[in-house]
Amino acid sequence: MYVHNIAELGLTPESILDYLRKSRTDDPALSIAEVLAKHEELLDGWNVKHLGRPVPEENKYREVVSGETIADRPQIRELLLRIESPSIKAIKIADEARLSRGDLEDAGRLIKLLRHTNTLVIIPDSWGGQFVYNLRDEDDRDKLERKLKEGNQALEYQKKIMRRGRELSVQRGNFIGWRAPYGYKKISIKQGKDKCETLEIIPAEADVVRMIFDMYVNQDMGRVNIAHRLNELGVPTRTGALWAQDTLKTVLENHHYIGKVRWNWRKTVTIVEEGEIKEVRPVSKVGEYLLYDGKHEAIISDELFQAAQEKKGRNYRAKPNTKIRNPLAGLLFCKCGRAMSLRTYKYHNAEPRLLCDNQKYCGTTSCTYADMLDRVRDILKQCIADFEVRIKDDNKDAASLHANLIKRLEAKRAELDAKELAQWEAQADPDPSKRMPAHIFQALNEKLLKEKDEVRQALCKAYESMPEPVNYEDKLVRFQAALEALDDPEASPAKKNKLLKECIDRIDYHREKAVRKRREGKKKRITVNGKRKVVSDLRTGANWTETPIELDVKLRL
């Protein structure tokens, strides 16, 4: 609705939140700060004209990291938490598309929150007027939904045009990545009237790239050994981290080193996983990406690069039928982020141990396989005992308590509705002597409406935060099956691994570095300056200090 007299809404600067965000439709030559300042001037001008002063600084939300969805924008998430307060009556934005240009799910969530918190949406005009959306009004709600949908359609069309432009830029040999590969820096050059992005060699880093390809192809070294050699030589990565085989895999596959640029190397793919829609960026297979001649200089020859790709094919070790021999595979990780591997030894009857694949650099002490299984058993037993208690005392379950709270709030709302109806019926009595004085009725009615609004808001919050009912019987069965499999010597490691993964998401392991003990040996007599003395034969023993194992376990509850 277009409101001419803003005073009718009963707003104050403290009851309004300003939301500022740069959109793709804004002038690309302007920075985020310049766009936000321009819009802030518009919103402040409206406030001064209608309410005498701008909104307080704490009521201004400036979105610096802008994304397409609400989940990608931290400031809009904070604003949506603020509107739950009864003191916030409205939000003010430059135009509707600033709120959301995401999909229908995002728009629906936004409208639902604004509607149930009774929050107005104000769109100021450049000449000082305004359009106000009241989401409890069906026409206003429909108009805002259409505006948000139009914004989403415009965004999708704009992204399509940008993709075409980026593909054309790659075909012309330009570099369109946001970060240059190791060995290069990103630069801008002029070609006629056009400004193009390309790469320029960093000599010191380029020498390292040549060294990596030489060690891999000509010296027949594997990626792990190359990483060790570079780390021993003190060669820094661009981020300052240690070289790892995954980093080297990226280097050895990078076509930019032979003067090429590529398109669709890692395209965004939408998948559904465990009932949730996610976006992933897998590396494309051969034939799914396109290569073009780049404007930058190559670091290595085509022949050396091709030899590296052929060697990678020969050294492929993945075996689809490989049997799992470690029940904790894919579950146990070191504090440094690397997986813990099961190692067996053929000498001195040594026990199997679990150690970090990156132990040489992170220094985490290993542990025996038996000790770790004991710890996992204890965790499963504790969970089973907890489930049994919860099953016996299910009335105290969080979902049940929440449901009881909602019942009480619904009963309170019904009671207030009946009370309001009774007040109005009494006030409508044909006999004026039986009616309350107008000022008393108005005061009582305002108090009642305020109480109803508080109950309504409490109900909205209760419904939104309603926890899913927990089936502890099902969890008990899963955890018991995993425990029984661990204790069963006949169960295969693959079966144990599968059952454990139904109970545990991840185990993060940490253990301080062990120190070798010194122990006193046997007493012996020696002659010193013609005199016999009894001394201890001190020597280094085979025992190590016992440092505690620290586990951070994420269960599937």
Image (spheres, helix red, strand yellow):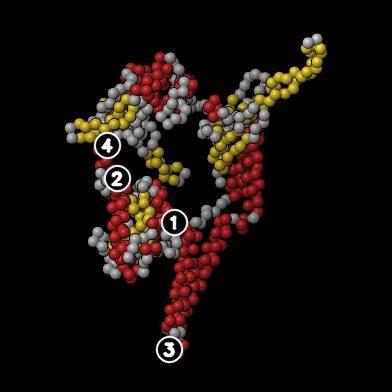
Q: Which residue is mark 1?
A: 81
Q: CA distance from mark 4 to mark 1?
A: 38 Å
Badge 1 amino acid: Leu
Q: Nearer the viewer, mark 2 or mark 4?
A: 2
Q: Which residue is mark 2?
A: 31
Q: Is residue 498 visible?
A: no
Q: Residues within 10 Å of mark 3 (few under 14, many from 20)?
A: few
**Mark number displayed over residue 45:** none
Q: Which residue is mark 3?
A: 432
Badge 2 amino acid: Ser
Q: CA distance from mark 1 to mark 3?
A: 47 Å
Q: Is residue 452 above or below residue 315?
A: below
Q: Are marks 4 and 1 in contact (CB under 8 Å)?
A: no
Q: CA distance from mark 2 to mark 1?
A: 28 Å
Q: Is residue 430 left or right of residue 529?
A: left
Q: Nearer the viewer, residue 416 or 29?
A: 29
Q: Is residue 138 left or right of residue 429?
A: left
**Mark number displayed over residue 166:** 4
Looking at the image, which residue is at 61% across and 29% down? 513
Residue 7 x/y as whole percent: 32, 70
Of callouts 2 and 1, which one flags the residue occurring earlier in the amino acid sequence?
2
Q: Nearer the viewer, residue 61 or 56?
A: 56
Looking at the image, which residue is at 45% across and 78% down? 443
Q: Does dot 3 land on a helix, a strand or a loop?
A: helix
Q: CA distance from mark 2 to mark 4?
A: 21 Å
Badge 4 amino acid: Arg
> How many numbered badges does the structure rendering display?
4
Of callouts 1 and 3, which one flags the residue occurring earlier in the amino acid sequence?
1
Q: Nearer the viewer, residue 399 or 174?
A: 174
Badge 3 amino acid: Pro
Residue ranking furthest to the front: 529
